[in-house]
């Protein structure tokens, strides 16, 4: 028999399938990982097909070894491999690597085997004790511990000595066996509340599980009880003997969601996300593969959970840009989920209070069902949104970032014993450092971006590559000592609030405070338990969190994302404002939102104030149609990256000429084609050029294939080229 193998080497030169002879000594299946001779060395590979004969004209080699005692890649994922490779123009092995924990490659992580000790079969504690001498203190201690149940030999050995355990085993009084010790991620305890679904919630469950559409948009205002609907649907699926995938947009949401799921479904739940240790991720992944767990909860990558017979896939906060992978391999989570839904005959639920325009347009056209939740649970009101004109604040003599109205509201909230959340989507203390005399801005040596001052560490940091710099005491160009700092970040907000309200307890949540493992859960749990009065944070605090004592939300620089050179900017700003506003007044207390902006008359704020998504959608979709932007067209970005600017420019020009030649042959398929430097010209010492295309919907797949062919035919020595469809970040 012949195995078709994809070798685990990520280069275009070997991005194809190779034939190998299966030796009679090996029992191999499609999806197995194997060791194969390749050139002068042996390398790992994946079997993607097995056949009886080969078309190879050259002598074939035998597979050397099978690497696992299980098959890690399911048949479903092999089918997904071909689809993703074809439609996203991805290297085959890059897709395959998505399906397994990274540390499996090279055998860098394995199951942990440990010795486990129990009383010997048929031997009672009393009988065992009677056979020991009175002075065998340590052996008696071991038996006393085992009378309560089994224990790991390492634990017993540390407390009573390994010789005591060995002596008991020799006497036949205890049994020592090798078991797998599971590395279990910590999940905060959360009691499972018995909840009776409202009529609106129950109708949603019925429509999802028994309605005509297999894919549904669950369109519900913030606080409308979408999570309970998810739990009820998954409960039905599990009772029917199927499996489920539950996706959340942020790692910070995973402990909260995991706590609720673990309380409801116990050990049937496994968690998958990048915040786990290598061992924890491997063990959770293996539990899903072996069927020990049947519900996968996690961020984007959990869509590849190795479970069979999927009954439902849920994508919470489906509008979130984190569901689109911006690094190689690039993919869209909802597209993968749709493939798995169709493959398994499952249900797919996209949940959001502010759906993406693409999703809502598809739903409006009947391509999926729409289930609307108009009311918050228990009839609680949506928070009142007050818009503060920061230009008026300046005219009144307030040049700070905190308005008088917000400071007043924080004071009232503190006096009433309630909590506040303050959102600013910019971390650090100041966003840049500039010389007052010559205007030099401190920039990263490796990236074409300004450095952010982090006062707590007293360092300038690059938010692209992470490189830290010592804060200069004078301008490196002109020697001037007076330096000015730019727009404030979360670190500065905490300092100002602490000065204004010295008795208040503040917590900050951003990328800087959540680097340590478990820090997400620690910060959110502390705030939920009332250990802090004010939570200041970036985008991490916007989505899905449920804090019953939060009655005030402050949104600073609400228009910061409004004027990016990106067609998503109005949509993103509306989503951020609405989602952040939804954190207030979620229990039986009324909530208020203070929204600070320099553009108070912009249409997105009037729609957000009235919680009018439909009005916003109609306005924004009309603008997109008139200006020929997605979802009425498709944006394709070809990004060229190289350490040599000349090489990046040369490669970009070559491909641009070929794209324009194709455009001349098919002008009806293009709205525009342009070549340029990337907005951020250099990242990590690599220069970036790009070709931007807007394609009409006419023969778009054929046009996209032609673009892929142009890119793939190019010699890419000393450069990397990536193709992105409707990129989430145009920088």
Image: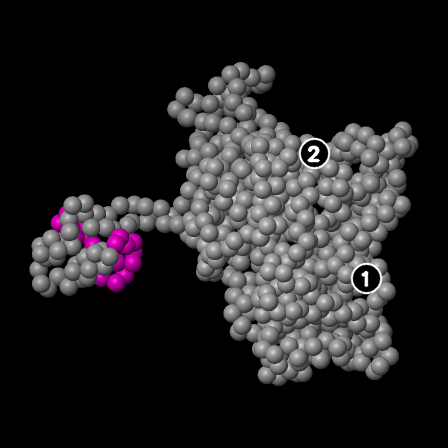
**Nearest to the observer: residue 711 or residue 555:** 555
**Label 1 to label 2: alpha-carbon separation:** 40 Å
In the displayed structure, does residue 417 sit left or right of residue 271?
right
Which residue carries the number 2 mark? Answer: 87
Q: Residue at x 45, y 59 (%)?
A: 191
Can residue 330 be spotted in the picture?
no
Q: Quadrant of residue 64?
A: top left
Is residue 168 in the magenta section?
yes
Provide the major secondary structure of the magenta segment.
helix
Q: Is residue 192 magenta?
A: no
* Helix, strand or loop at mark 2: helix
Which secondary structure lies at badge 1?
A: helix
Q: Specify the segment rendered in magenta.
A: 149-174
Which of the pair 680/623 is nearer the observer?
623
Residue 210 vs residue 67, the one in the foreground: 210
Residue 167 in the image: state x and y as whole percent: 16, 53
In the displayed orientation, state which residue is furthest to the front: 199
- Label disc, if present, on residue 643 of the rendered structure: none
Q: Nearer the viewer, mark 1 or mark 2?
A: 1
The residue at 58%/59% (across/down) is: 252
Image coordinates for residue 555, horizontal then vertical, percent:
72, 68
- The x and y percentages for residue 347 are 59, 38
Q: Is residue 578 visible?
A: yes
The residue that disc 1 covers is 606
**Mark 2 Cα shell of 10 Å, populated few (<14), some (14-19), many (≥20):** few
Return the x and y of residue 225 as percentages of the image width and height.
59, 55
């Amino acid at each position: 028999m012949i195995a078709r193998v994809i070798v685990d080497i990520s280069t275009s030169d070997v991005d194809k399938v190779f034939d190998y002879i299966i030796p009679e000594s090996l029992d191999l299946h499609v999806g197995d990982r194997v060791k194969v001779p390749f050139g002068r060395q042996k390398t790992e590979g994946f079997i993607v097909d097995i056949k009886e004969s080969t078309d190879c004209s050259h002598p074939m080699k035998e597979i050397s070894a099978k690497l696992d005692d299980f098959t890690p890649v399911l048949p479903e994922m092999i089918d997904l491999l071909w689809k993703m490779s074809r439609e996203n123009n991805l290297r085959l092995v890059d897709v395959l690597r998505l399906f397994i924990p990274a540390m499996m490659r090279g055998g860098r992580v394995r199951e942990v085997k440990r010795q486990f000790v129990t009383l010997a079969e048929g031997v009672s504690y009393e009988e065992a004790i009677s056979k020991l001498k009175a002075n065998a203190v340590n052996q008696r201690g071991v038996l006393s511990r085992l009378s309560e149940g089994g224990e790991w030999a390492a634990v017993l050995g540390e407390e009573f000595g390994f010789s005591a355990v060995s002596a008991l085993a020799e006497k036949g009084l205890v049994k020592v066996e090798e078991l797998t010790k599971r590395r279990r991620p910590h999940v905060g305890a959360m009691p499972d509340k018995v909840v009776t679904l409202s009529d609106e919630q129950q109708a949603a469950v019925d429509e999802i599980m028994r309605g005509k559409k297999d894919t549904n948009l669950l369109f519900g205002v913030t606080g409308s009880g979408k999570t309970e609907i998810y739990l009820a649907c998954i409960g039905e699926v599990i009772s029917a003997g199927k499996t489920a995938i539950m996706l959340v947009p942020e790692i910070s949401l995973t402990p909260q969601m995991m706590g609720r799921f673990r309380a409801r479904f116990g050990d049937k739940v496994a968690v998958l996300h990048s915040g786990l240790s290598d061992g924890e991720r491997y063990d959770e992944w293996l539990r899903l593969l072996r069927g020990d767990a049947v519900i996968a909860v996690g961020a984007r990558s959990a869509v590849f959970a190795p479970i069979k017979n999927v009954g439902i896939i849920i994508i919470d906060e489906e509008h979130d840009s984190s569901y689109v992978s911006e690094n190689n391999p690039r993919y869209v989570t909802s597209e993968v989920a749709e493939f798995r839904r169709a493959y398994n005959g499952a249900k797919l639920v996209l949940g959001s209070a502010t759906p993406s325009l693409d999703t809502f347009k598809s739903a409006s056209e009947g391509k999926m069902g729409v289930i609307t939740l108009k009311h918050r649970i228990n009839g609680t009101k949506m928070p009142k949104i007050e818009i503060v004109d920061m230009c008026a604040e300046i005219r009144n003599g307030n040049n700070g970032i905190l308005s008088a109205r917000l400071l007043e509201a924080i004071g009232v909230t503190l006096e009433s014993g309630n909590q506040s959340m303050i959102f600013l989507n910019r971390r650090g203390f100041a966003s840049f450092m500039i010389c007052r005399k010559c205007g030099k801005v401190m920039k990263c040596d490796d990236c074409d971006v300004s450095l952010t001052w982090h006062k707590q560490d007293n360092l300038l940091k690059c938010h692209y590559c992470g490189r830290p710099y010592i804060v200069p005491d004078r301008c490196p160009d002109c020697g001037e000592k007076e330096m000015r700092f730019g727009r404030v970040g979360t670190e500065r907000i905490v300092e100002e609030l602490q000065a204004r309200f010295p008795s208040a307890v503040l917590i900050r949540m951003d990328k800087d405070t959540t680097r340590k493992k478990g820090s997400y859960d620690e910060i959110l749990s502390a705030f939920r338990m009332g250990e802090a009065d004010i939570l200041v944070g970036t985008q991490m605090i916007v989505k899905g969190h449920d804090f019953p004592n939060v009655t005030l939300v402050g949104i600073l620089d609400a228009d910061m994302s409004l004027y990016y050179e990106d067609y998503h900017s109005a949509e993103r700003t509306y989503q951020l404002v609405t989602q952040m506003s939804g954190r207030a007044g979620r229990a039986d207390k009324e909530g208020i939102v203070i929204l600070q902006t320099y553009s108070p008359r912009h249409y997105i704020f009037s729609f957000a104030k009235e919680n009018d998504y439909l009005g916003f959608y109609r306005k924004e979709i009309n603008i997109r149609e008139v200006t020929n932007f997605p979802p009425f067209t498709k944006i394709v970005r070809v990004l060229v990256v190289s350490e040599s600017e000349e090489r990046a420019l040369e490669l970009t020009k070559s491909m641009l000429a070929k794209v324009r030649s194709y455009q001349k042959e098919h002008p009806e398929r293009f709205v525009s084609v342009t070549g340029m430097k990337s907005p951020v010209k250099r990242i990590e010492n690599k220069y970036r050029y790009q070709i931007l295309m807007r394609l009409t919907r006419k023969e778009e797949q054929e046009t996209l294939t032609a673009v892929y062919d142009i890119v793939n035919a190019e010699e890419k020595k000393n450069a990397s080229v990536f193709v992105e469809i409707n990129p989430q970040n145009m920088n």
